[in-house]
Image (cartoon, coloured by chain):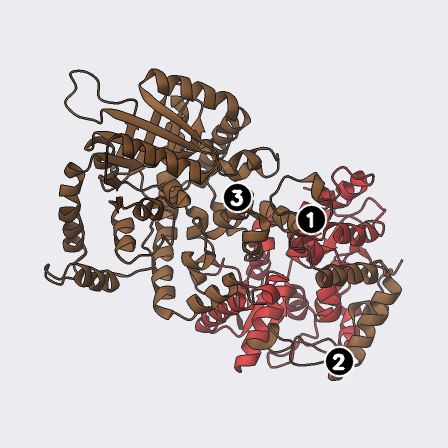
Chain colours: A brown, B red
Amino acid sequence: MTSTFRTTVRTNLAKPEVRANFYRAMDGLMTRRLDQFPDKAELERLRTQSMAIRANALSKLPELLETLEANLTRNGIQVHWAETTDQANQIVLSILQKHNAKSIIKGKSMVSEEMGLNHFLEALGIEALESDLGEFIIQLDHEAPSHIIMPAIHKNRIQIAKLFHEKFPDIPYTEDVDELTQMARRILRDKFYATTVGLSGVNFMVAETGTLCLVENEGNGRMSTTAPSVHIAVTGIEKVVESLSDVPPLLSILTRSATGQPITTYFNMISGPRKPGEKDGPEEVHLVLLDNGRSNIYSDPELLATLRCIRCGACINHCPVYVRIGGHSYGTVYPGPIGSILEPQKAGLDVHGELAQASTLCGACSEVCPVRIPIPSILNRLRYDGVRRDTANTNTVGSGKRRTLSEAATWKTWAWAATHPTIYHAGSSLATHFKGMLPTNLGAWTTVRSAPKLAESTLHQQVKNLGVDHE
Amino acid sequence: MPPIPDTIYFFGTCLVDLMYPQAGVSAMQLIQRAGVKVIFPPAQTCCGQPAWNSGYRDEARSVARAQIALFPKPIPIVIPSGSCAGMMKVHYPELFAGQPDEAQAVDVASRVYELTEFLVDVLHIELQDLGEPVTVAVHTSCSARREMGVADKIESLLGQLSNVQRVEHARKPECCGFGGTFAVKEPEISAAMVLDKVTHIRHAQPDRLISQECGCLLNISGTMEKQGDAIPHQHIAEFLWERTSMASTSLSQRTDRSLSEVEGNTTEGTP
């Protein structure tokens, strides 16, 4: 049976324009990241430090979340806990209903994508407008993000120009990037003032001070969190750090790893609603903390590292699989290497376990990960969980669900042969001896390759003639 | 720096055994020529990596356990493959964690060397190039590059050869798309990757393609051949032996030479 993933991959591989767009973008991002770290030793020191900061935060996650809640509440931020995305959506809805709001303006937030918030609200007749330029573009085209940092990276300038012209026929056609940006800016500007509720994501939550940190470049994050009278932040429970001093190293490695920028245009630190006498800022600030499977990941010491992620997207930018199939092929909110370990854990191996197979384990992702998440090791562990029989020994959702009788039998036979050298070598000798009779069509392998050629005789046979000690 | 051992174990890998025995032969000859005795335990089969990477850990462990038993002496184990070396060095300790034979697995892991690493860091091999001028493109395997961290060794070995010119190709550090069972489980993505790799290598117009990984060579050369216009390819061990042994072969010669020619070379190279 061909899976949805395989079908989508096939479709996307056949789109040369999309592939070219990804290549161009990813090449640029890889170069820009490299330029940001001229001193390799400094990079490695910063990676180690960042890993330790995140690992420290996760090691005391329940405690830090309590401190965070206490300090946020003291600062006047209302904290809400959601175990599921449904609960998170209901919380957002109840805040909107309280203010009788019929629309919401959004800064960039992957967790809101995870919640499917836009669809949820639109089904209730509430408009959810994306204000991040990339998100704005893909919303116009009714698409999902194809990258966690650059949601519209799969489109090129011409495609975007055509899309704008189609959606806003009154505005003259242009392919000029600055003009296109200005166009979106003008359309959005009025919305910021007219909308009562703004929504954003969060990059870091500081437990010590009860501060929400938001990294962005376009200013829409600041507009979404200050212009409307109510600000709702949504994020995953893992985004907490212990103290304010943890933020500068993480911020530095985040922006440099993500877009190759030494610093972003905006760095917002939100520590409460508008105080009496202050001229701007929202009157209410809410934080929705989403679990959605994260506690389960937290419970496994080996998989816990998944939660260190600071969502820079460097693993995605460097992944040879992602660059070819594009973000939409994954069929998940988070694509690429981080998606391939996070999504199967969140939704279950039976649902997205195939993503753990979509890697050559080349290690390019873990080589660049700013917090040293051992992505290939976690992929390997998930492959194991998918086919293991002792499912009682793991909390991973959908464990054992990928085990098939035929594959299990194949590996069992292989193991039997490889532990019986006489049988194994008789088999390999026979194969080389009768190699002319072996099939030349080997299914998937021979679609682009010729069949592997066996040698005239095996190394085992040749060694005997070499003066090598065959003990 | 580890001292030069008197004797080493050689683990040939299943791909070398079946497809590229000449790479194994040449690797052992290079080591023997440096005055080091080579033991090739005949009962060796496979390191267990295919099952490990597929999630079948029990099966991988039983195969790995059978290999571990073959290397009892406290001497280095040299492997002409980054990924099999990586399996033994990095993953055996993981695979045997908490098992009764964990100590033996860790002991084996501590003695594993990828071939080029062993030639450079332990043997400090000095190569004299006897071959005709040739240009080569190098494909470093991901395992050698990232898991073992030894990708610079193949470059330094080739750098010793005066008549060998290395040509660079685009996206050199990128995976060729083999990934063991990946090539079979995700054939479309794998095909896209290897076709790009082939294009980049062809652009560089090398006389030969050299790698320290037979899996990558199998993937890349198989693709070149299917498309026609294959560039001759060799495992680094075979290339080094060919360049530095008296009976060095000419460029046009096929890479899978017959055993009789090799036997002729064996004694000449021994110091």
In this image, A142 relative to B156: left or right?
Answer: left
In this image, B70 relative to A110: left or right?
Answer: right
Residue A285 at x, y percent in the picture: 29, 26
- Real-space Cα distance between discs 2 and 1? 38 Å
Q: Is residue A392 above or below residue A75?
A: below
Q: Quadrant of residue A169 in the image? A: bottom left
Q: Tell me the quarter of the image containing the N terminus of chain A.
A: bottom right
Confirm or deny contact between disc 3 and disc 2 (CB under 8 A): no
Residue A48 at x, y percent in the picture: 50, 33
Amino acid type of the residue tagged 2 in the rendering: Lys
On whether disc 3 and disc 1 are found on a single subunit, the reply is: no
Residue A17 at x, y percent in the picture: 34, 68
Mark 2 belongs to which subunit?
A
Q: Which mark is residue A346?
A: 3
On whether disc 3 and disc 2 are found on a single subunit, the reply is: yes
Q: Which mark is residue A435?
A: 2
**First-in-chain label (3 vs 2):** 3
Q: Mark 1: few, some, or many residues within 10 Å (few <14, many ≥20)?
A: some
Mark 1 belongs to which subunit?
B
Q: Nearer the viewer, residue B92 or B20?
A: B92
Q: Is residue A63 above or below residue B51?
A: above
Amino acid type of the residue tagged 3 in the rendering: Lys
In the rendered picture of this protein, how many numbered marks are placed on residues? 3
Residue at 81% in and 49% down: B65
Q: Nearer the viewer, residue B65 or A408?
A: A408
Amino acid type of the residue tagged 1 in the rendering: Val
- Real-space Cα distance between discs 3 and 1? 46 Å
- Please identify, in this view, whether the residue under mark 3 or under mark 1 is nearer the observer: 3
- Please identify, in this view, whether the residue under mark 3 or under mark 2 is nearer the observer: 3
